[in-house]
Amino acid sequence: MNTPTDLLYAKTHEWLRQGKEGSTVGITDYAQSALGDVVFVELPKSGRKVTAGEVVATVESVKAASDIYAPVSGEITETNPTLSADPGLINREPYASGWLFRIQADAGKNHALLSASDYSATLSS
Amino acid sequence: MDTPISSSPLAACHAELGARMINFGGWNLPVEYSGLLLEHQATRQAAGLFDISHMGQIRAQGAGALAALESLLTNDPAKLRMGEGHYTFLTNDQGGVIDDLLLYRLGPEDFLLVVNASRHQEDLRVLRKAQNNPALFQGDPGTKAGMALQGPRAEVILSQLLPAGETCPLRNTIIESQLLGIPSTIARTGYTGEDGFEIFTSLEDGPKVWRALLEKGKPMGILPCGLGARDSLRLEAGLPLNGQDLSPEISPIEAGLGFFVDLSRPRPFPGRAQLEQAKKNGARRTTIGLVGQPKQAPPRHGYPVFLSGKQIGEITSGVPSPTLGYGVALALITTPAPACGQDLEFEVRGRRVPAKVSPRKFLLKK
């Protein structure tokens, strides 16, 4: 399983990349592989305020619908516009063009996210 | 599940193939090997091989077997010729479905019932309870290795393992034969909407036959297939899943499967009066096919269904169809049923999604 070391992770299999203009969120290689071929994605509206752990999106494969949780509290600023036409991007490039949404995290909050090695450890247990 | 998890006799084969395993009705079974979509397409276009060792086998053998089955099952076993099989129901006194099964007639007083794994013990209990001679019904779970070879190339592949000069069984018939010299029970049936076979061998011989089928089928594009593809394939073909589309609270008439309730014979069976009534006057509920649209949230089990804003029932099984590219579903609704083509909606995460009533056989086969 590919788990890039420059990202932060939630136990619920989302990744978060911190940037200048907020953070980008997607699902991990492990999650996309477990889910199988993604056929439909439901994303949050821009401007929505969310709390860490809240269901914010749904990713569906033929097998099942899977809830996606906000890894941090904050405001959704942008969603990936290409996913509705090509949801398979989540399988092919989970850490790049398959990203789900951008979020401006609330300042001053201490978010309990995992490093790549800690996240990987949760997968093997 | 409180019961211990049973391991398939083909478990070693699945491990070699790198299958992802899940617990299904108390059995540890493959859900996916190379990927659900690839497996689904292989079965539609070439062939797929499925582990069905969890499917239960019950043998009804000896004097009184026919009479016993006539008094318990909805389809008339007396109409089966030797070597022939049909789909039938074991119903409760209300006409609800305890199990749906395939019944094969091996001799005048010798029958094989192929039942759902999750219902096997309950079936045995119900079948035996009704008898003066409970020993008539034999067959514990986990005594056979079972596999389903499905798809347009299934016949060509199976033929290569049969003894020289022997041909595959005809549709809905069963034969005792040999594959690679291994004694095998072979029925031409399946759960995918494709031509195909269900094959049963001893536990020890299962892996040999499994590997040989994959090897012979390789040049034709066979893939081992998991429960994931099995579910999407059966639903595209409009076939019901016990525990979702069928249950003790749902009758065969309500499930839209009244064809398999034969009322032309005199003998009573559990729930006959209720089923007769429902067939004549219509049931309170019925099952319809429902299709969604491309790029919309797919229908899933449990979603409510609406007609003109009013809830009329719910989806019992639903899946984004890999072949069609939109969602297909079975829905149990109150009657009268809207006509095919009628606009409906189903609710996904608080949002209404457009759908249409459709024939339940979602695929139009050439």
Image (cartoon, helix red, strand yellow):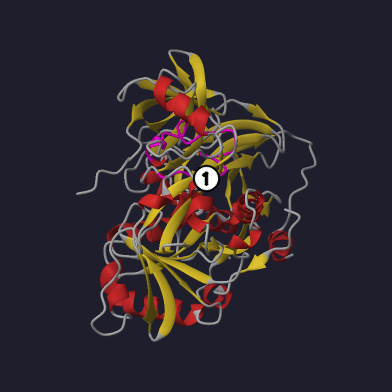
Q: Residues within 10 Å of mark 1 (few under 14, many from 20)?
A: some
Instruction: Give the percent coordinates (x, y) of residue B360.
Output: 36, 37
Would residue A48 be found to the left or right of residue B185 on screen?
Answer: right
Q: Position of residue B76 (x, y in %)?
A: 41, 46
In the image, residue B147 sits, relative to residue B346, either above or below, namely below
Q: Report the residue marked by disc 1.
A: B71
Mark 1 belongs to chain: B
Q: Residue at x 80, y 42 (%)?
A: A110
- Please tell me which residue is depicted at 25% across the width and 43% down the height of the picture: B364
* Quarter occupied by residue B171: bottom left
Instruction: Please tell me whether residue B40 is drawn above or below residue B339 in the rendered image.
Output: below
Q: Which of the two residues, A107 or B152, is positioned nearer the viewer here? A: B152
Q: Nearer the viewer, residue B27 or B96?
A: B96
User: As shown in the figure, which amino acid type bears the numbered disc 1?
Assistant: Ser
Residue B6 in the image, given as x and y percentages of width and height: 66, 66
Instruction: Report the residue that reaches farthest toward the left.
Output: B366
Magenta residues span B239-259
Residue A97 seen from this side? no
